[in-house]
Amino acid sequence: MSNRRSFDVELADLKQDILRMASLVEQSIYKAMEALLNQDPLIAKGVITGDDAIDRLRYEVENNCIRLIATQQPMARDLRVIVTGIKILTNLERMGDHAVDIARAAMCVCGRMPTKPLERIPQMARMVQHMVKDGLDAYVHGDVEKARQMCAMDDEVDEIYNLTFQNLISYMEANPHSIPCVVYLLLVARYLERLADRATNIGEDVIYLVTGEWHELN
């Protein structure tokens, strides 16, 4: 096998490794929200323990990226593929951490969470999960337009977050006994907002990968 063909295979493997990690992260986000909405501590614990696999995979693939840069000395688009891969890995790893944060919050409110303050948080979660999926689809297909559309959703998530924050504060003022529980919902809303920011980062990375130009979309 020629050096060029061998390198192409390694770049294709890198993409598959990133998608494998992305699948773990998507599942972690979904399970963390399931733990919160169903108030299920066992699901939450599964998210927390499962984060070790995400972390291990991140460092394994990142080290492989560094090896490719050192041994292949890539240029132009090949270099962008590897650099973008490292950036996406970092964002995915942080997404996994935010999923763990949500799972920990879920464990703190299990069995004593009022229904009303939860109204908008599932809506935020659905939008975030949609953003993550679309960002990864854009990465797979090199779809700049889809990346831009996905990033535009971040403004909607921010708007819902701001409204959620105000509503939760008002709820705690009217129901002081709820403060120890509802404060964790404030944190969950913040973690979801950060997940949307990370998804936007991936969209920006996709645009750079395809065009070679950085665009600030967050």
Image: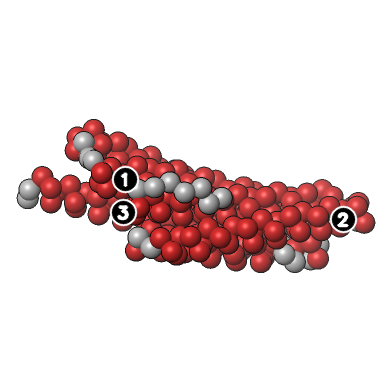
Q: CA distance from mark 3 to mark 2?
A: 46 Å
Q: State yes or no: discs 1 and 2 in contact (Cβ < 8 Å).
A: no
Asked which secondary structure carries label 2, the reply is: helix
Q: Secondary structure at mark 3?
A: helix
Labels 3, 1: front one: 1
> Which kind of residue does numbered mark 2 sit on?
Ser
Q: How far across and how far down the image is residue 170, in percent? A: 87, 55
**60 or 10, which lies in front?**
10
Instruction: Give how far apart the Cα atoms at labels 3 and 1 are.
Output: 12 Å
Residue that carries the numbered disc 1 in the rendered image: 80
Residue lying at 53% horizontally and 65% vertically, measured from the top left:
130
Can residue 44 be seen by looking at this rendering?
no
| Residue that carries the numbered disc 2 in the rendered image | 170
Q: Position of residue 218 (x, y in %)?
A: 56, 50
Upstream in the sequence, badge 1 or badge 2?
Answer: 1
User: Would you say the residues marked 3 and 2 are in contact, meaning their CB atoms lie under 8 Å apart?
Assistant: no
Q: Which residue is mark 3?
A: 15
**Viewer-side residue, 43 vs 91:** 91
Query: What's the residue at 58%, 62% (across, down)?
Result: 153
